Image (tube, grey):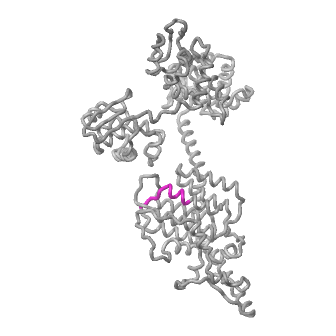
Amino acid sequence: MYTNDELTEFMDFLVEQTKDSIYPLVAKKVFKKFPNRRLIPEDKRYPRFCSHFAPKMNEFNKYSIEERIRLMYALRGKVEDDFLTRIQAHGTVELNEKHRISKFISNDGTFSLEDDRERLSIDTTGLEFVRLLDFLIEKTRDVIEPLLVTKRIFQEFSRLEPGPRHKHPDKMYNRKFRYSLAPNMNKYSDYSIEDRVRLFFAFGGEIEDDFLRTIETHGTVQLDDKRRITKYVSNDGNFKLEGIRRHIMSKPATGPEYTRFMEFLIETTKDAVEPMKVPLVLKAFKRQEGRKFTENGYGSRFHKKLAPNMSKWSKYRIEERTRMMFAMKGKVESDFLAQIEASGKVQLDKNQLIVKYTSNDGEIELGGETRLVEKKKRKSTNYHKMHQKRRKIIRSVTDETSLVAKWKRKSDSYYEMYQKRRKIGEKELSDTAEVEEVAPYDEAPNEDQDTQLNPFNAMSNLTTNGPSSNAQEWSNDEPKQEPVFEDIFIQNQHFPSEIEDVPIQEIRRIEPDTKLAYLNIGSSVQGAVITDSGEIKLHKFLNSLELILTSLESDTLDDLLNDIEGIRVRINDEILPPELVITALQTFLLGITRKSRSAASAENKSSHECLRIFKYSLLWLRSPLLWEIQQRVAEEIESHVIGEKIILVADVQQGIRNILFAVSS
């Protein structure tokens, strides 16, 4: 059962989703948007609405009567008598045969709803439907009794149709006949009434009222309780059909193949004391039978043929059959359960599977906690497989402080090595001819060289404060404009005209004076890539993005995993330019901090959690190049600004997509 808060959360969501509905909605799409997965699983939401919420709609007095009427109309909820009385006090209401609202008009006439099903109707005059109808009428032209099997007819038609084959063509075309052609059969006046009647008689189509009236003008017709034709005689007596549709009875599982299957299972499970791995058992029988069917095929035969009729296999002792059903996880029917109870004590779970069995003489004991332990173990295994990468991150940063300190020391060593190199270079230059130094022209006050040349800080100036006095102010609760990669790169590539006019041979590059900028010298200026241990390769960088996506656990982000796999296949594992990586990651960080908000109805995640996952992915890369951005992320996490704010999953999705665009261009 649900608490009042949980009921309110779900009802708030439904009212919000249906507040502007003027037509019935596709319920599956509505319930899929519900953000709280832990409250109600996705596949249980519509059944829970029908069983828990719709019957109690009259009790939800927190919501206006119009909101509840619109909700029940849009989601096709069944109206109970108490709520119907309530609705009738506020207007005129019409219900269909399933007790769902089809029309409502308020007493003052300002609020009305009407289910116009014509807008949802499929155009059955299309070429595909015409070809299908032509084919079916031709196939049933000489039929004199109802067809027992129609599967092969639909399969034959699918082979004649152009385009890709459907996985189950017989089911697809059967649905098109029953739900598209049959309801509109009265409109196909180009075909004779005899052809259409014979088609419905052969396929057991449900007769609609308009087509029934047309048939009755041409002859006498009888229908069964499912509105299928059982007898028809034309007015002139020249055309007669009569027959009752019979269900195809399942063939008894007594053939030699089933006997061999049963003997194999009894022999295989004769020593089993716990549930076996069923696929391995079925695979072994498949090899024995010469691979006639798949493992799934034999599994279906066991569950649909053998298990339901286990009480009839009296050739085998009850203990043997019980052990086999326990080991193979077969569902126990009531007649076989009575036989088991006569031979011992048995305990079943909610799925009618044997959990525990003890024979009357005490010689056979099966189960106990074995099945429960196995189930928990299986769930645990699946969980660990799903989150293997995320747990790997956590293990790799167990001692986060020492790891960061180690990278900082490594960065310091690079800086010291650079200073030595710089002094040697200055000494050599002092003995050479004077060379003019040219620096980018900038009227702004001089900043510290670290700030000027560090791509991380350059990004901060570019996207936060900026040189413009007309910068727009953003409130804490509103999403900010996320920087666009193309604009950033174009701005970084701008050079003043004074530099462009200077001959190349007269330009001497000014060495940067920062640790991080030193590491970027090779790739950012000379076009080379760094080859020391601080390098970041493309495929490892893509792995870090996968870690972020899998840790966030959102179906919305699944398409990005496919994009990453495509990039990995398409592009070789090359070293990424450091300034490109830093710029992309800085932009992603700004996207999280700027687009965080206090509340949102769409799917969202905790901003604090996103930053924490982002921090771990940076640590997992193990690159001293990222030391400063790691510090920035840590500062954001520790600050009180981010607090309890959230960020839309769509914003995270766009941020990751921008990173993929940058590294794959």
Q: Residue at x 68, y 68 (%)?
A: 535
Q: Magenta region: which residues? A: 644-655
Q: Residue at x 38, y 41 (%)?
A: 22
Q: Is residue 320 left or right of residue 224?
A: right
Q: Position of residue 497 (x, y in %)?
A: 62, 81
Counting from the top left corner in percent of width and height, residue 389 is at 60, 54
Which residue is rendered at x = 55% and y = 68% of the image? 586
Of all residues, the one furthest to the front in this rendering is: 190
In which quadrant of the rendered view does residue 115 lie?
Answer: top left
- Give the vertical position of 375 relative to 186 (above or below): below
Magenta span includes 391: no
Q: Is residue 595 left or right of residue 519?
A: left
181 lies above or below 7: above
Q: As rendered, which of 569 and 535 lies closer to the eye? A: 569
Residue 240 picture quarter: top right
Whether residue 290 appears in this view of the structure is yes
Q: Is residue 652 magenta?
A: yes
Spot occupied by residue 312 in the image (x, y as percentages of width and height)? 58, 16
Q: Quadrant of residue 64?
A: top left
On the question of residue 420 being in view, the answer is no
Quadrant that contains the N terminus: top left
**Image quarter in which the C terminus is found:** bottom right
The answer to whether residue 312 is left or right of residue 428 is left
- Count how many numbered circles sit on residues in the image: 0
Residue 150 pos. (x, y %): 60, 21
Vertical arrangement, residue 540 with respect to residue 226, above or below: below
Indicate whether 436 appears above or below 554: below
